Amino acid sequence: MSASHANWWAATVAALSLTILVGCDVPTGDTSPSLNTETEISTPLVQEKTFTFLGGPTSEFDPLIDTTSSDFDSLFEVGSANNDISVVQDIDNFDIGNLDGALDNATGSLTFAQKNFEEELIDLKEEKVPVSGKQRIGDLEVELQRSATADVSVTGSDRVAFDKSQDNYVELGNTKIGVQNITISPNAEELVFDRLRFTYPDIRVKPYGKNDQFVVEFVKTPCGDGRCGPNGEYERDITNLADGFGINLKNARVYPDKPKITESGTTTFRIGGQVNPDLQVKDDDKISLGGSTSLTDFEVQEIDVGAAKPFTVAVTPNENGGDINVANDNEVQTAAFDGFEGITGRVDGLELADVSLSFQVETVNLASTDAQLYAAIQGKQESGQVLLGGTEDQNKSRGADRNVSSLPFSSAGFTDNGASLPNDSLIKLGVGLENASLDETVRTPLVVDGDNSNVADFVNALPTEVRLAGQAEINTNRGGLKARKPISLDANFSLNVPLRIKDRFVVRDTIDADLSDLNDLTDPEEDVNISTAELQFSYTNGLPLGADVKMVIVDAAGSAIETFNDGFGNNDFRIEPAAKNEDGAAARSSSGTFVFPLGSTQKDLRALADGDKIRLVLNMNQKGSGGGTAAVARLRADDQLTLNRIRLKADASIQTGN
């Protein structure tokens, strides 16, 4: 190329360049490049966390319910063969105890009247012509062996009857029998009697045979204070006859003749002895003996009667003798359901199905009778109280009615701080003792279940304290009755049922979960377009219950940042139940996934980035339980729920520059 040609080409390029510059807008600001960056966060927060339904610190997997904690260590029992769970609670410390007042109520005011006697044993004026073989008093020949018989009235009781043919009796406590106010005629310097015997044929001493009659004999040389006579008599000095005697009859038995409840009865009293043949008398003298016999400080310690009217006895204290106040600590016996204490700290709303209580009424020294315990049994916990009410038995073949149609005692009812308790909130527990024996502890099992009570409402209130106030009616059949002090009646009951869930309950658990990776998406200096931000859950459920899931994200201080599905209303956040067999136990695990969306803006995620833990609240329920059976869910200790994965997942584009 020539030099002129080269100059032309350079001038042309320069001219074109100038034309282009003149025809375009020229930028005048930051001329750095603009970039869009795709960002993905995929952080595993939990990798396969498995829960067993029950367990403890040494369990391979975390338990939903720690049965070794003080809350639950006495609540659940696990079968060794199949890991079936039973809910177990026992109350055996009501200590109702002494019912000795029952004897006084049974016998009423039974007493043996004082018997005054004035017995003319010999009227010398009327003695006949001497008969060979008779002994002499002075110049007179008379029969020196003399006796008289009298009846002592049994009065004051229209409550019991004694059948002599059945050897019915009343056994005495510290009761004193005596003869006093003795008068003797004639008034002589010498002894009027050589021997004098007081016999009570209807009073027997051990071993209570018909020949073991209570006898006191006045003789010239007594053997001692006790029953030391040749036939077990008490002996006293004849020279002190005028002083009479007084002897404690403890453990002696009286066999009255009182065949009808409404009539008084009698016992027999006999005097017999020998007149002193050396007695100086006149032809018209009369030899007589006067005085009185009585039982004082009368106390009954045992009875065996042919018939008795029904009577009532206070089972728990009754301070003023009127209505029994179940709210008054002094008028109830209390006990604890220890296993329910504090249960709401981890589990809320636990309700059991097929609930029953096994009552046991224990009686001592009541026999040949029956007892009906009328009780107000109140369960209390922090949120309120519930009464165990009996109903007619829906299982008619069993006939275990627990309803209180009316109270048999008019003097006292049941109240709660002045408000009368209706009969349908009370319960009756009947005990038959017709074949019992004295000195035998009789334990009578009684079932209280859904057919004859509101026991499900009572137990599912999870009471931590149980209060019992009661009265008993004894001998409702008006038949025979045997009773001996000390008389006692006690009641205990136990709950031992398979853990079958009636409806729903809530379990809570907290999981470590560091959400700080969200900080990568929350820089206010960057323009972030968030397409996905969520927590992904996958699970395998071997429980026969499903769960609606609530999630609370909390910071390191434990303060809640945000709650998701607070009312359990979103069915997208759900763990489906395992299929059940016919008995309600899990037969086949279910698997699935669900996600919690965390938000779509930097503002949504900024606070969540401080998340340190996830609190999960599982609303365990029957919803969706399947497997071809409608059986109520039955839980086993080793039933498992596994959270296979909890992952923080976020997708976003971050634009940097212009």
Image (cartoon, grey):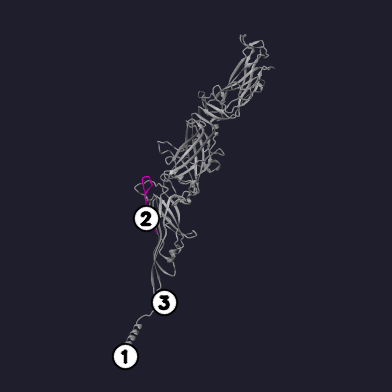
Q: Earlier in the sequence, mark 2 or mark 3?
A: 3
In the rendered image, the quadrant that contains the C terminus is bottom left
Q: Quadrant of residue 212?
A: top right
- Residue at the disc numbered 2: 592
Judging depth in this view, the residue of 442 and 187 nearest the camera is 442
Q: Amino acid at mark 3?
A: Asp
The question of residue 584 being in magenta is answered with: yes
Q: Relative to 643, does residue 444 appear above or below in the rendering?
A: above
Q: Secondary structure at mark 3?
A: loop
| Foreground tag (1 vs 2) | 1
Q: Amino acid at mark 1?
A: Ala
Instruction: Tell me which segment is drawn in magenta.
Output: 579-595
- Residue at the disc numbered 3: 30
Q: Earlier in the sequence, mark 1 or mark 2?
A: 1
**Are there few (<14), some (14-19), or many (20+) residues within 10 Å of tag 2?**
some
Considering every residue shown, the one lying at the far left of the view is: 1
- Residue at the disc numbered 1: 3
Judging depth in this view, the residue of 296 and 35 nearest the camera is 35
In the rendered image, the quadrant that contains the N terminus is bottom left
Q: Relative to 622, does residue 220 appear above or below in the rendering?
A: above
Q: Amino acid at mark 2?
A: Gly
Cα gap from disc 1 to disc 2, whole angstroms: 84 Å
Q: Quadrant of residue 572?
A: bottom left
Q: Earlier in the sequence, mark 3 or mark 1?
A: 1
Kindly identify the residue that appears in the image at 67 percent across and 22 percent down: 240
